[in-house]
Image: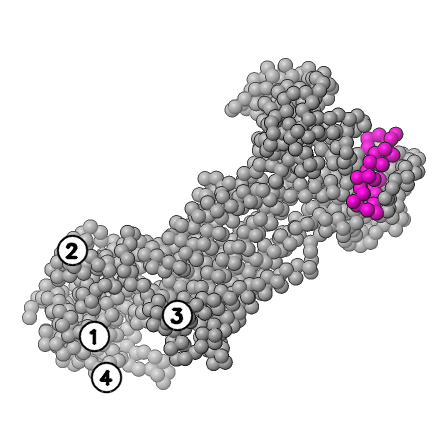
Amino acid sequence: MSGMSGMVATLRGVRKTVGSGSARRTLLDGVNLELEAGKLTVVVGRSGSGKSTLLHLLGGLEPADEGAIEVAGVRVDGASSAQLVDLRRHRVGFVFQFFHLLPELTGEENVLLPARMAGDGAQARERARALIRRLGVEEAASRLPGVLSGGEQQRLAVVRSLVNEPLLVLADEPTGNLDEASGHEVLGLLRSVADEGQSVLLVTHDAEASRLADRVLTLRDGRLAE
Amino acid sequence: MRPLLAGALARLRRRRGRALLAAAGIAAAAAMTGAAVTVSYNLHDGFARSADEAGIPDVIVHFDPHAAGRVAARVKSLPNIASVSLQLEQRPVVLRTRGHAPITSGDLLGTVGTRHGYKIVAGRDLSGRTGEVVIERGLASQWHLHPGDRITVGGPSTGGAVGARVVGVAVAPDNVAYPLASGARIWMPYRVVAAIDGAAGQPVNTALLWVNDRSQLGVTLEQARAASYGLSGVNFVTREGVGVLIDGAAGIVIALLVAVSLGALVGAGVMVVASSRAEVQRRLETIALLRAIGASPRAITGAAAVEAAMVALPSATLGLAVGWWAAAGASARLLEALDQFPRGAALLLPLSVCLVAIVALVAAASAWPTWRACRRPVAAMLRDAELPTGARALRLPAGTIGLGMRIAVARPVRTAATTVVMATSAAVVLLLLGLATTLQRLEHDPGTIGKNYQLTSHSGVLALPRIRRLPGVADAAQRFSSPVADSFQLGETFNLVSYCGNRLRFEDPPLAAGRRATSPGEAEVGQGLATALGLVPGGTLAVQFGDGEEARFHVTGVVRTLDNDGRVAYVQPGVEVCGFRGGQTVIQLKDGADQGAVTAALNLTGNRPATVGGVTSRNAAFLGVLATLLRTIAVIDGLVCLYVLAQMLALTALERRGAVGLLRACGADRTQVGMVFFGAASVVVAVALPVAVLVERLVLGPRAADLAASYATVSLRAGTAEVLLALAGLVLIAVVASAWVARRALAEPITRLLRDD
């Protein structure tokens, strides 16, 4: 396992509840977490325990009720919408369970989508092609998602999450919708991403992920434990 | 069926926003329909309807003042006469009332008899007592007069003035209303008018004749001509002739409005059908599930129809009411300007028919695709309800706009339906813009009616050489125009035009048939006159002048001219007209000549010139009313475009929630999300505009121009400026719709968008 140092993200006393009245439920209850560069951190827990919410808070997709969240030196809690847009463009990359590739775009065009949002043109194209080559998805890159396998689609999604060279990659059950072999490939990719120096936070039920991780945390009753 | 209906109700309640969106679309279409029906139904056949209502005479005979007794005796000898009123018409008289500037062009009428040819619309008729006056509605509107108010009437010959109390307000459709007409008409007891006139011997100068049998009017006119021997200045005007004149005054605009309204109706119908189809497409998965659990196609279709009708009934009612409200005021003002009556409560019938038709159309438009969908295998329906895989590679950009374009293309039926509605609406807007330009040209540019001269002057033939020598003058000629009647159909009056000089250099309306009249005794007749008299090249035009003289001309050609509604004949007289006195000097300017400098030079030589205008009324109020009507239709049309595009984008946003969520997760800001929707909208705009231009140029424009003036060539082709203006409007609509939909899409949390995909 790689050992590049440097703090990429921290959570201090983060609290998040959902619902209201009698249906109110606490998902995260004073969560503290530090994510280092070059590390693959895996969070496991039961369904509905708040694992995905933890990723969403780090990516600025939804706000925390309490606590401090900092990603790559930027305070996420209380950030303006422009700051959150900048965070998503340059500092954070997402990989989702259901790939979320746009069916109208080819693999390469899907990969380039975050770069286009960031206004990063020619350089991003070179970067994307290099990533595509490095991660071995050249064939899928020229085709539309509708004709690709789940594994190919998720590998493209991983490449997409990296195209803007984020410091933090957030992967939400990336193997949850894949067969065993494809899941193995994707986990291997994420491991290599961490080895390249980026911090990867992986939420999963996959036991194999725990074997590849630098650190495995369990989310239970709103709190993280080693 | 009952559970399905209950389901439909529940769905409407649950998806209130979507139901409201559909209702808004139906309401917009209904508003357009309501406005179109209100305008066209009110204006259609306006003169005939109003003439019947007011009981205007079949023939109006004007002549120089004669003793009423002598005129009455002659009229009594005529056959087929049902009723007669004799009038003394005195103009101009000065009208005054408190708080307003005097009107110096008053038209005072005093009637010997009981029928005036008007309808009292406020107050009562004259009782015969002095001190009473009935005023025309146009004057009442201008001066805000009501029964009980007072005015003062003065005759120029007496210099004195009499005060009178307004007892009634009348509408006489045998002329347009003041101020569209140059004179404001008022009616007072005959003896008061005679006293103001100051003439002795009970003089009258107008006879109003009502006949028993209108089909025998020609015979009556022929007899009347003969009986008028000894009277001077005799001029016959038939009710039919008045109708032609009145309709001609605003006929071009009214006919175009009717044409535009019909276009709007077509657009509204297409929109209703398209939105219903989109709704069914959106519900395809639900329909498939209902089929899968055993619901019959008939029950599903029936429930869809009832659900659609439940949305359509209130929204169409509201829309029709809004359309009526928007157009009723403007069309009523237009009718008022023409001295005609609106339909009033009679409008309820066509509006009710429209309500039933719209609800039926919406129900059918929902039921038919539902029925077709139900007939297909459930698996195929479920497959079609899924998002397209985008298996076809598209040569479109991959940026935000390009992505939007690809998303739009992935739903070809919806995009095509939206494009059809947008193209129809844009074509109507182009027609309106073309109409506005044409009206402006008709008003100011004499060239549009085939007149190639810019100034006129009442100089004699002898002044021609001196005028021709003036700097900036290309040529000048003497033009003679005489009001004449057809020798066989005396009610058909028209203008006979001849020139001392080369006529075609000054006046060359396009030939519709035959050839130019170049030899003595030949004539070209306007299309309007040719239609009225059944003239064709090779025929004979028999003309009777005011003094009873007759002349015959060989018709060589038919020309398209708007001058005098095409009731004009251009002749090469058998005698040299250059020796005649009178006429009008027409002056053609050199290209680029300063009209002001030429005018000043003419003034210096004592030949005071007048600028030549076009054919339409120069009455600002009248044109203002027309502009309001056109604007109303254009605004409703624009709102329809906005709604249709917004609905298409809203449907897209709903279907592609995941895509919007992903874009935002990748760092898209509000502008970028908006650009994606703008890209989708731009596909519609890019196709709709060229289609609209083609439809306007090839279908709507020629058809509307033909309706407006079949007797003349009027081009309603939208020019480059109009097309650019329409493009700007469509782009603006696309920007507004995109921004609105993007705003709604951004209001939702990203996580929910991604979860619901």
In this rendering, do the residues under marks 1 and 3 share a single chain? no
Instruction: Label 4, secondary structure: give it.
Output: loop
In the drawing, does residue A140 fall left or right of residue B690? left
Residue A10 found in image quarter = bottom left
As measured in the structure, the alpha-carbon distance from the residue carrying label 3 to the one carrying label 4 is 50 Å
Q: Which residue is mark 2?
A: A129
Stretch of the chain drawn in magenta: B207-234
Task: Provide the secondary structure element on which disc 2 rests.
Answer: helix
Q: In what quadrant of the picture does the C terminus of chain B appear?
A: bottom left
B669 relative position to A107: left or right: right
Q: CA distance from mark 1 to mark 4?
A: 23 Å
Q: Which mark is residue A221?
A: 4
Residue at the spot of label 3: B376
Q: Which residue is mark 1?
A: A176
Considering the numbered disc 3 on the image, is that residue within a helix, a strand or a loop?
loop
Kind of residue at badge 4 = Asp
The amino acid type found where label 3 is placed reads: Arg
- Callout 2 amino acid: Arg
Badge nearest the viewer, 1 or 3? 3
Residue B232 lies in the magenta-colored region: yes
